[in-house]
Amino acid sequence: MIIAEQKSLEELSKMIIGCKKVMVAGCNTCVAICFAGGEKEAGILASVLRIAAKKDGTGQEIIEQTVQRQCEWEFLDEFEDKIKDCDVVISLACGIGIQGLAERYPNKKIMPGVNTTFLGFPVETGVWEERCAACGECILGTTAGICPIARCAKGLLNGPCGGSQGGKCEISSDTPCAWQLIYDRLKEQGLLEVMEEIKAPKNWSKSSGPRKIIREDLTIGDSDKADKGKKES
Amino acid sequence: MRVECPPNVKVVEVPCTGRVDIIHILNALEKGADGVFVIGCLEGECHFLEGNLRAKKRVAYVKGILNSLGIEEERVDMYNLSAAMGQRFAEIVKDGTEKIKKLGPSPMKDGQKA
C-alpha cells in the first residue's frame, strides 16, 4: 500500500501560524496501516497541537475528523460541515487524498501533514519496505515475484551489476541485491533458464505521468461529483 | 499496609500498562496534569508478557514529543515494580511528586502563562 511518514512537529507548527481554527484531517486507509495518519494519529497530532497552543497562549482551536479515505468524492463530502470555519486543514492522507481534499474544497488552505514516500509492504510491525514502482508494465511473472524496478537501485532488467557483493547491493549493506533474490528464488523453483531470456530496454513512457485510465464499460457519466467543489466556490 | 501517599495523585487503574496509549498520556497533559507516571510490572514479569515493554516505548515517544514542544520530558515517566511492593509504590509516588513540584505547574494549566 501507499506508505507515508508524518512530517516533523516543527514543520507542521509552521503551517498553522496565525490560523485561528485548525482541522487535522485523518484518513483510515493506507496511512492508518502505516501509522502515519489514521484516526489514532490524527487524534495524537490534534492533542499535541492543542498542548502547544495552550503552552504558547495562541488561543488556537484544533479539531479533528477522520474519514474512511480521502481519495473518493463520497468520503470527502463528509468533511463539509466541520471544515466550514477552519482557516487551515492539515491533511494526513497520502498525496492523492490531500489533492482530493484540496480539489473538493478549493477555497480552503489544505496543508500536507505527511510525506508520501513509496508503495510498500509491512514486512514486520513497524518496518515497511518498498516493493512496487507503479511502472505500468509488470514483469513479476518473469522474476519470481520480485520486482527489479522497485528493489534494484539501478532498476536493471537483466541480472545484477558488478556492485552486487555477498548478496548485497553496493548502495548499502542493509539492502539485499534484488537480482540475487530473484536468482535464489528461481533456482529454488528450478526455473533458472527464465533468467537467460533477455529483456528489451524498458519503455519508460508507461511509467511517467500524468497517467490516466478510462474504463468505458464502467463510466456512468457522474463527473458532477468531481465538480462539486468548483460549484460551491 | 497503611503507607502514606501524597493526596494530589490521581490513580487510573488499567489491567496492564500495555493498555496505556500515547493519546491517554497526551490527554492528561492537555487537561492540565503536571505529570504522568506510568507504573507497570517489572520488566520480564509482565502478566501479559510484553505490555510493559510496549508502554516503555510509548512513554519514550511521548518524551520525544515533549522535547520538541519545549516541555520538560521528566513530567512523564515510567516506573516498574511488582504488585506486591506497596512500600515501593508509595516511594515512587512521593519521589515522583517531589520531582514534578520542582518543575513547577504545567504550562498547560488554564490561565497559566508559559
Image (cartoon, coloured by chain):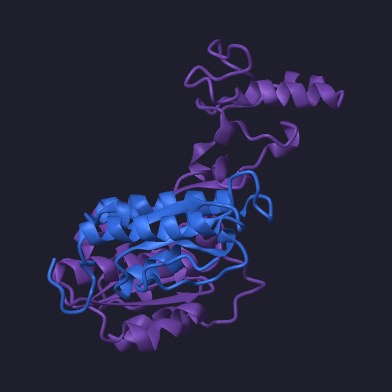
Chain colours: A purple, B blue
A189 to the left or right of A105 = right
Q: Is residue A191 visible?
A: no
Q: Tell me if residue B75 comes above or below residue A221 in the rendering.
A: above
> Looking at this rendering, what residue extends furthest in the right direction?
A190
Q: Is residue B3 visible?
A: yes
Q: Nearer the viewer, residue A116 or A45?
A: A45
Give percent across and percent down for residue A230.
33, 82
Q: Tell me if residue A95 comes above or below residue B110 in the rendering.
A: above
Residue at (63% x, 17% y) in the render: A167
Q: Quadrant of the C terminus of chain A?
A: bottom left
Tally the numbered discs. 0
A221 to the left or right of A108 = right
Give percent across and percent down for residue A168.
58, 19
Based on the displayed image, in which of its 4 quarters is residue B19 positioned?
A: bottom right
Residue at (87% x, 23% y) in the render: A190
Give percent across and percent down for residue B96.
36, 57
Q: Nearer the viewer, residue A169 or A100?
A: A169
> Looking at this rendering, what residue extends furthest in the front direction?
B2
Residue at (61% x, 57% y) in the render: B84
A69 to the left or right of A49 = right
Q: Tell me if residue B44 comes above or below residue A70 in the rendering.
A: above
Based on the displayed image, in which of its 4 quarters is residue A44 positioned?
A: bottom left
Q: Tell me if residue B13 comes above or below residue A197 in the rendering.
A: below
Give percent across and percent down for residue A85.
26, 86
